[in-house]
Amino acid sequence: MFHHGGWGSFIRYDEERDRPDLDRKVLGRVWSYGRPYRFHLLGVLITVFVISGLSVVPALLMRQLVDQAIPQGDVAMLTRLGLGMVAVPLVNSLVGITQRWLTSRVGEGIIFDLRRALYIHLQKMSLRFFTATKTGELMNRLSSDVVGAQQAITGTLVIVVSNVVSVAVTFFVMVQAEWRLTLLAVAALPLFVLPARRVARILRQVTRREMEHEAKMSGILQEAFNVSGALLVRLFGRWDEEKERFTEQARMVRDLSVRRAMVGRGLFAALGLVSALGLLTSDEADEKGGVDVGARGRI
């Protein structure tokens, strides 16, 4: 059983307490670190559009192959479609490599800027600040937390834009193919969007707690492994107390990491089950004679 509540702790969530405080000022500060790399980010967005567009090309090529090239016996069209199916993965790979290079440049640049700015800011703090703040926590901010801030600009931005573009392109293609089935699919979206939003909120809260305990664990390590800290532990015989302090924080980091890994697994499993049931239903309907989809015939 996991620490503090077992499996029930995977789904507990206080929405009012954990609601993020995002406003224009915070978003402006985040963007201030991405602005120097705006042209690289523009390149990333272009690659996202290209990759999203290429994702539907194989389906369109296959449609032409089945509906026209094969029934008509058009060898020239078959050749063109075959070359297209080979070219799409190659172009997709090249664009993906370019996107990876751009995101790496932006991401590592933002990490450098964040660490440099944080170091300069800490150097200007008063001595009182350093006496009241654990060195290990500061080290954790410099080494680990800046990576999370960087991911908000590169990883999150790319994922959001990619998903939006993919949905738009897929929706357009689906409408062109059969608008009634598209409306049916859109009507079912809230059944998936609402649980996904809740999972995202829970994941945010769990991740924040994990980062807090990692900072505390780093603080304990810094206190125990410097000369003065090791000397105090030996002088006052605090072996057991220090061991329990570190064990408690390490246990919390472990349990929160497991919880973070498990959050959303149930939702993804349900999505997979629904997809499988949809395929089974489609196969059964096809065996019974097809489903009427309008003027385009039966499938």
Image (cartoon, helix red, strand yellow):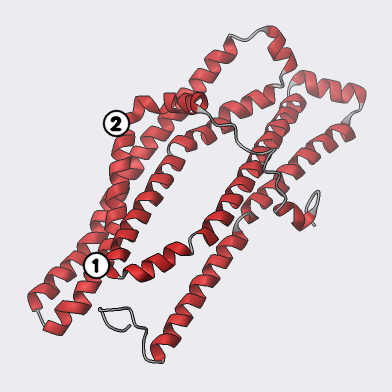
Q: Residue furthest right?
A: 236
Q: Residues within 10 Å of mark 1 (few under 14, many from 20)?
A: few
Residue 39 numbered mark, or none: 2
Q: Secondary structure at mark 1?
A: helix
User: Is residue 220 found left or right of 169 in the rendered image?
Assistant: right
Residue at the (43%, 81%) spot, across then down: 282
Of the 4 image quadrants, the one containing the N terminus is bottom right
Asked which quadrant contains residue 174, the reply is bottom left
Q: Please tell me whether residue 147 is drawn above or below residue 162 in the rendered image.
A: above
Label 2 to label 1: alpha-carbon separation: 32 Å
Asked which quadrant contains residue 154, the reply is top left
Q: Which residue is mark 1?
A: 60
Q: Earlier in the sequence, mark 2 or mark 1?
A: 2
Q: Please tell me whether residue 294 is drawn above or below residue 11 in the rendered image.
A: below
Residue 18 numbered mark, or none: none
**Depth order, front residue of 217/187:** 187
Hey, what amino acid is under mark 1?
Leu
Camera-near label (2 vs 1) is 1
Q: Please tell me whether residue 87 is drawn above or below residue 164 in the rendered image.
A: below
Residue 14 position in % (x across, y down)? 71, 44
Residue 175 position in % (x across, y down)? 30, 64
Q: Please tell me whether residue 153 is drawn above or below residue 165 in the rendered image.
A: above
**Depth order, front residue of 10/107:** 10
Residue 144 position in % (x across, y down)? 58, 33
